[in-house]
Amino acid sequence: MESKITIYLTGDSTAARKTSDKRPETGWGEVFQQYFIRNAVIENRALNGRSTKSFIHQGHLAHIEESIKPGDFLLIQFGHNDQKIEDPERGTQPYGDYQENLKKFVEVAVQKQATPILFTSVTRRMFDDSMSVGEYPKAMIDFARKYEVPLLDVHKMTREFMDEAGKEESKKYYLHLAPGESDNYPDGIEDNTHFNERGAEAVAQLIAKALKESDLPIKSWLV
């Protein structure tokens, strides 16, 4: 009998599935399956608007805890909505409850004999501030070092990718639409956080390539 595993993806709208009324917005998690062999199933549990705090408080981590099993993987990417500290339902302090919440995700995986992998937040399209998601990527890196949790610095790799593309070319990866270009956005939109299909594909490919080149056990499940 062939062995099978599930790769649980947790995160926010940058990775989450989109409804038809939001297209062409696309989460990178929607296109991640193509980089894995058929016995590795991507279970995309990322949700729009969630932070580590709201994802836990709304019971989504508890639902994963009920089904995750030995040999599975738990990918953890938050930060964009944790950054909204003015919102008591979502905001966290990077070196406070954000790290405490990350520990809860990791503990669920470890207790179930699954492998947690931390992903720093994907970059926003910003060229005047290298900290496009504040202190959250650094806080995650520091947490990973302290507790010896596997980590992929997705913020760094996506930042470098967009920097190389440049200010104008990088717009082609985000939700930038002129008025009348999309029925879903009749007045147009300039969104420097969320990806279009091209951007989601680029980010998913970057992540898959980095995992393939890592020494993490998940690499054996990649195509």
Image (tube, grey):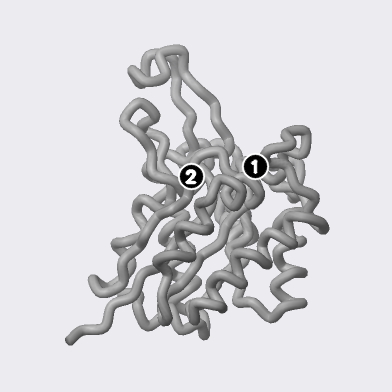
Q: Residue at position x 36%, y 50% from top?
A: 30
Q: Judge from the rendering whether residue 138 lies leftward or rightward of residue 40; answer left or right.
A: right
Tell me what residue is drawn at x 51 percent, y 45 percent: 14
Question: Callout 2 environment at 10 Å: few (<14), some (14 to 19), or many (20+)?
Answer: many
Pointer 1 residue: 81
Element on which disc 1 rests: loop
Residue 96: x and y in percent read 81, 56
Q: Is residue 175 visible?
A: yes
Judge whether 203 appears above or below 104 on screen.
Answer: above
Task: Report x, y in % for residue 40.
Answer: 31, 72
Precedes in sequence: disc 2 or disc 1: 2
- Circle 2 is placed at which residue position? 47
Q: Is residue 152 visible?
A: no
Question: What kind of residue is marked 1?
Answer: Asn
Residue at image position (72%, 67%) is 141
Q: Is residue 121 left or right of residue 201?
A: right
Instruction: Please state if 148 lies on the left or on the right of 20 as rendered.
Output: right
Residue 222, disc: none
In the picture, residue 8 is in which quadrant? bottom left
Q: Which residue type does callout 2 highlight?
A: Leu
| Mark 2–mark 1 distance (CA, rounded to whole Å) | 11 Å
Specify the quadrant that holds the C terminus. bottom left
**Which residue appears at 67% of the width and 41% of the height?**
90
Q: Tag count in the figure? A: 2
Please tell me how crowded label 1 is: few (under 14), some (14-19), or many (20+) other residues with Cα within 10 Å.
Answer: many
Left or right: 6 in relation to 94: left
